[in-house]
């Protein structure tokens, strides 16, 4: 199955909706990201994946793609969460497939990460949240209520 992409304007609106509960600091960062993508990336076609209470081993895309941005907000919990993106089409079973890790250590904490040129994901994208930085599937997955909410933006 091919990566299903859409116009950046639709992606921008999905990100706005997906991050509506976040505080104001992410709004200017989002605007800057889409300005760069629109002016310097020739309005690439993008796809979005909305994260809600992320745990482990969530397949975002099972085809080769490019990762561009991640918006995250930790839920109101004291349990540490470590968000990770894996270059895999099916699972997060291999630590060496990890391509991005973002610690969420404070209740309600927000993060934004972007790579305007993108990070190639040859196999696909699997996302997960763990209670330890070295986590992967079956080791230390976050339980329901401890994982973050947010949005992942990627393209073909």
Image (cartoon, rainbow, N blue to C red):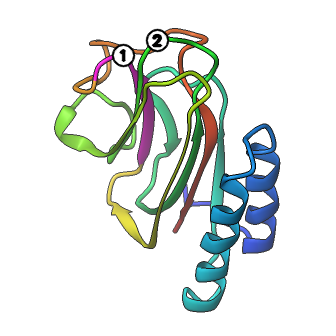
User: Is 73 displayed left or right of 9 in the figure?
Assistant: left
- Residue 112 in the image: state x and y as whole percent: 54, 52
Circle 2 SS class: loop
Q: Nearer the viewer, residue 34 or 141?
A: 34
The residue that label 2 is drawn on is 79
User: Is 44 displayed left or right of 6 in the figure?
Assistant: left
Q: Is residue 80 magenta?
A: no
Quadrant in which residue 4 is drawn: bottom right
- Residue 14 in the image: state x and y as whole percent: 78, 54
Disc marking residue 35:
none
C-beta proximity under 8 Å, tags 1 and 2: yes
Dot placed on the residue nearer the N-terminal end, 1 or 2? 2
Q: Nearer the viewer, residue 63 or 148?
A: 148
Is the magenta region chiefly helix, strand or loop? strand
- Residue 156 in the image: state x and y as whole percent: 52, 68
The vertical placement of 118 against 134, above or below, is: below
- Residue 69 in the image: state x and y as whole percent: 52, 58
Circle 1 SS class: loop
The residue that label 1 is drawn on is 131
For the N terminus, the quadrant is bottom right
Q: Is residue 130 magenta?
A: yes
Quadrant in which residue 65 is drawn: bottom left
The vertical placement of 141 against 11, above or below, is: above
Q: Nearer the viewer, residue 152 or 26?
A: 26
Residue occupying image coordinates x 50% and y 24% = 106
Q: Which residues are magenta?
A: 125-132
């Amino acid at each position: 199955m091919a990566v299903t992409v859409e116009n950046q304007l639709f992606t921008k609106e999905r990100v706005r909706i997906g991050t509506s509960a976040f505080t104001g600091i992410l709004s200017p960062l989002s605007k800057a990201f889409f300005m760069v993508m629109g002016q310097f990336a020739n309005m690439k076609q993008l796809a979005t994946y909305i994260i809600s209470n992320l745990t482990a081993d969530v397949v975002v895309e099972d085809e080769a793609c490019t990762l561009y941005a991640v918006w995250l907000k930790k839920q109101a919990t004291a349990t540490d969460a470590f968000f990770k993106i894996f270059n895999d089409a099916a699972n997060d079973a291999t630590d060496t497939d990890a391509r991005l890790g973002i610690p969420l250590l404070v209740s309600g904490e927000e993060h934004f990460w972007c790579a305007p040129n993108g990070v190639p994901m040859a196999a696909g994208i699997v996302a997960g949240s763990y209670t330890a930085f070295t986590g992967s599937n079956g080791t230390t997955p976050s339980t329901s209520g401890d994982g973050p909410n947010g949005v992942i933006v990627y393209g073909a």
